[in-house]
Amino acid sequence: MEVIQVTGKHLVDEFHKVPEIIYKKDRNWIPQLRLMIENTFNPAKNGRFKKGDAGRWVLKNDGKLVGRIAAFYDEDYASGYDQPTGCCGFFECINDEEAAFKLFDTARNWLKEQGMEAMDGPVNFDENFFFWGMLKDGFRPQTFGMNYNPPYYNDLFAAYGFKTYYEQYSYSLDITNPDLPDRFWKIAEWVAKKPGYSFEHFSFKNQDRFIRDFIEIHEKAWGNHDNYKPIKFQLLKDLLSGAKIILDEEFIWYAYHNGKPIAFFMQILDLNQILQKLKTGKLSLWKGLKLLYLKKRKTITRCRVIVLGVVPGYQGKGIESAIFHHLKKVMLRKKWYNDMEMSWIGDFNPKMNALFKSFGADRTQTHRTMRYLFDREKEFVRAPIIE
């Protein structure tokens, strides 16, 4: 078997051919957007290259593609743990331990050279709401940005020595369902009408103000997490600019108290429902036009909630319910949307998991982020619970 580092257009093409081989007979698999992945490995598009680096490889056996992997690190992520921690991702492989171990060894050795002492995977060299974690249960077509893999990947990672650092849970909910708990909507309506509270959806026209408000909420709501890192204004602006096709302004909501931002909610459109019909992640001019046509024809019926945060002091006061109160009005007007997937929530966040269950949401699948310590004698510790 031969591991080849990806350099040049031909090898980039082969990197993208690997999943087509692995999932040739799997009806649940939906191709990932090629441009989105290539932007991840483009220093001009991905700001993480300023404090890190990435490499990727394909694996061949007798000249035939049998696997691929990428490895990456950035100083902000690496410094958030007891040992410098890098990552591996975009792993695809035939069901063969020798092949998988060769790929894992390649990623580990490269990360060692960068000064790392552990690797997390399968994850992404980008925000953790895209392509993060390995599917453990709930093998069905995934929503946009969620990883899909064959069940045997779990065995390959475990056999190599990866252990679960945390599990990631996804929930499904139709907030227009009249059977949702009455208590939930009574609280929602009561909070929505309380003096001093206001709710507003995002607009690109005023995006600079909304970005600043999000940064303020993010710092207060997530600042006490062990590996919290501030988000840069320009990074968010670039993300929004490149993600317009999966955004609806009325699906992004802010809550304010006396004019101060206190909560943020964001859901994206499940573009996978169109990509599944196109059967490709490589968008030619024709495929791109067809995508826009299908979107306009209301082919997308599902959304994916990727962020819900409330600053301390306002948690447990029904702010989340009030946001859903306003969102429900939008969903009732846009009747073709009938499913919300809330993904993902880590097992280290019991409050948020309890919150979604209180909404009447059904848990539908589990992903997990795995960790491999290079020092095999070092004690393995799971992600700490958020109190």
Image: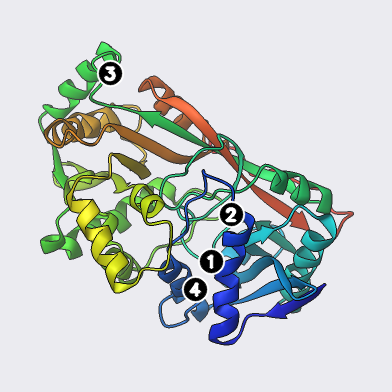
User: Which one is in front in this view, the residue at disc 3 or the one at disc 1?
Assistant: 1
Q: Earlier in the sequence, mark 1 or mark 4?
A: 4
The answer for how far apart the CA atoms under marks 2 and 1 are is: 26 Å
State whether residue 157 appears in this view.
yes
The answer for how far apart the CA atoms under marks 4 and 2 are is: 33 Å
Badge 4 is on which residue? 48
User: Which one is in front in this view, the residue at disc 3 or the one at disc 2?
Assistant: 2
Residue 110 locus on image (x, y percent): 73, 75
> Residue at the spot x=24%, y=65% of the render?
289
Q: Quadrant of residue 66?
A: bottom right
The answer to whether the residues at label 3 and label 1 have Cβ atoms under 8 Å apart is no
Q: Earlier in the sequence, mark 3 or mark 1?
A: 1
Circle 3: is it few (<14), some (14-19), or many (20+) Cα within 10 Å?
A: some
Residue 105 locus on image (x, y percent): 80, 67
> Residue at the spot x=24%, y=36% of the render?
337
Given residues 266 and 384, the one toward you in this image is 266
User: Which one is in front in this view, the residue at disc 4 or the one at disc 2?
Assistant: 2
User: Which one is in front in this view, the residue at disc 1 or the one at disc 4?
Assistant: 1
Badge 1 is on which residue? 125
**Which residue type does callout 2 highlight?**
Lys
Q: Earlier in the sequence, mark 4 or mark 2?
A: 2
Judged left or right of residue 15, residue 242 is left
Q: At numbered mark 3, what does the secondary structure look like: helix, strand or loop?
A: helix
The answer for how far apart the CA atoms under marks 1 and 4 are is: 8 Å
The answer for how far apart the CA atoms under marks 3 and 1 are is: 38 Å
Q: Which mark is residue 183?
A: none
Judged left or right of residue 231, residue 94 is right
